[in-house]
Image (tube, grey):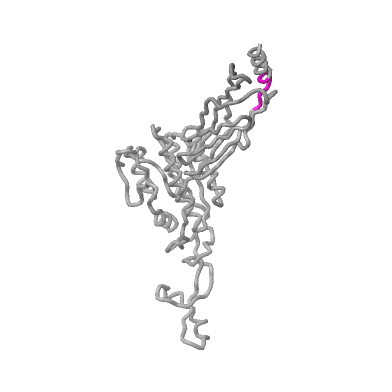
Amino acid sequence: MAAGISEILLAASTTGNVRVDLEEPYLNCFKGGEVIENISIRYRRNRFVRVLVSSVKGPEGVVTVPNDSTESLSLSFRPQYAGQFQGLRVTFDFLDPLGLFKKTLEVVRSDFIIDCYPSSLLKEVRQVAPLTLALGERSGRVHGSGQEFYSIDEYNPSVEKKNIYWKKTASLPDERLLVKVREANIPQAITIGLVKTVSRETDLAWMDLACEAAGDLGAHIFSLGCDVRLAFYRDERISRLEAEDLQEFRESLMQMSRSQVAGIEFVSEILHECEICVTGFKEVEDSLLASEVARKPSLLIKDGEILPQTIGNLSLIYTGTEDVTELVNRVVRR
């Protein structure tokens, strides 16, 4: 009789709608960090029935650790790679008061998203004025070779003599030399293009490094006062995103992390419009594509033991520790 009553309580508690709520379905962190999701379960007569997590399947590339509770379940997520991760599948076991019976419920939430930002965005970037800048569309707010008058300063040996302000110097009571300081002109925005033409068994690891590379480039570009554009292939078209600050850039990087394999016609278009290219060794196994990439400043991401056909003096093999300052300055000077 006790077992029958216990079974009836279990059936009554789980009959009808069992509501599962996520406290925050959209989480974000930097690589190496941890985020916590609290899950609330609403069902009838919850004081008689216990709930246990039977299994948890988070997004691929994310370590998920459940913390046992009864009514409010807590899951810890630790992304192993940079990028955007989506989807959550949790199986719950409802147990009757005597622990003799159970009823299983599986909850699938495709709206659950974790954005894991690359750690390269946490680096401290020293703001350095690019040398010998070509004219661009935007004031650089730093000393440079532009046409706009910036300020007056004292002469030093590193300043070109043509910039000496003779008229102002002549009115000084001492022998100091004054120079005209002009403001640097830089491009309005610099486009980073992601070229991906092959699928990989270690696609998450490769895209992680691609996000780190783009993040490193973007942080340096922002330090010069430029906006950053991203161009990549996704959903049968080229996505073009522009960011004016690091927050927008982080969100754009997460979209880029979901990019897909592109055909040669789309790759050619991305290479045509970007100033810096991020691609992999497998992509430049193709001699034609390798020659195109070699003509553009680029970061090459290593793929196992594969060697690129052509690297060129504008390319840098990127493993996550290289300094991309000179590459960015080279782009701005062009």
Residue 16 among magenta residues: yes
Q: Which residue is drawn at 56% across and 31% down?
A: 68
Residue 56 percent across, percent down from the top left: 52, 28
Quadrant including the N terminus: top right
Residue 287 among magenta residues: no
Q: How many labels does the image show?
A: 0
Q: Residue furthest bottom?
A: 173
| In front of the other: 206 or 34 | 34
| In front of the other: 296 or 221 | 221
Q: Is 58 situated above or below 221?
A: above
Instruction: Please indicate whether residue 55 sits to the left or right of residue 307 in the image.
Output: right
Q: Residue at x 67, y 18 (%)?
A: 9
| In front of the other: 152 or 271 | 152
Q: Is 307 situated above or below 107?
A: below
Q: Which residue is drawn at 40% across and 53% down?
A: 324
Quarter assignment of residue 196? top left
Q: Can residue 119 be seen in this view?
A: yes
Q: Is 142 situated above or below 96?
A: below
Residue 73 percent across, percent down from the top left: 59, 32
Q: Residue at x 34, y 39 (%)?
A: 303
Quarter assignment of residue 106? top right
Quadrant including the C terminus: bottom left
| In front of the other: 134 or 284 | 284
Query: Which residues make up the magenta segment?
Result: 13-19
Q: Can residue 288 be seen in this view?
A: no
Instruction: Please indicate whether residue 149 sits to the left or right of residue 44 in the image.
Output: left
Residue 131 percent across, percent down from the top left: 42, 63
Instruction: Please indicate whether residue 163 sits to the left or right of residue 75 in the image.
Output: left
Residue 152 percent across, percent down from the top left: 52, 75
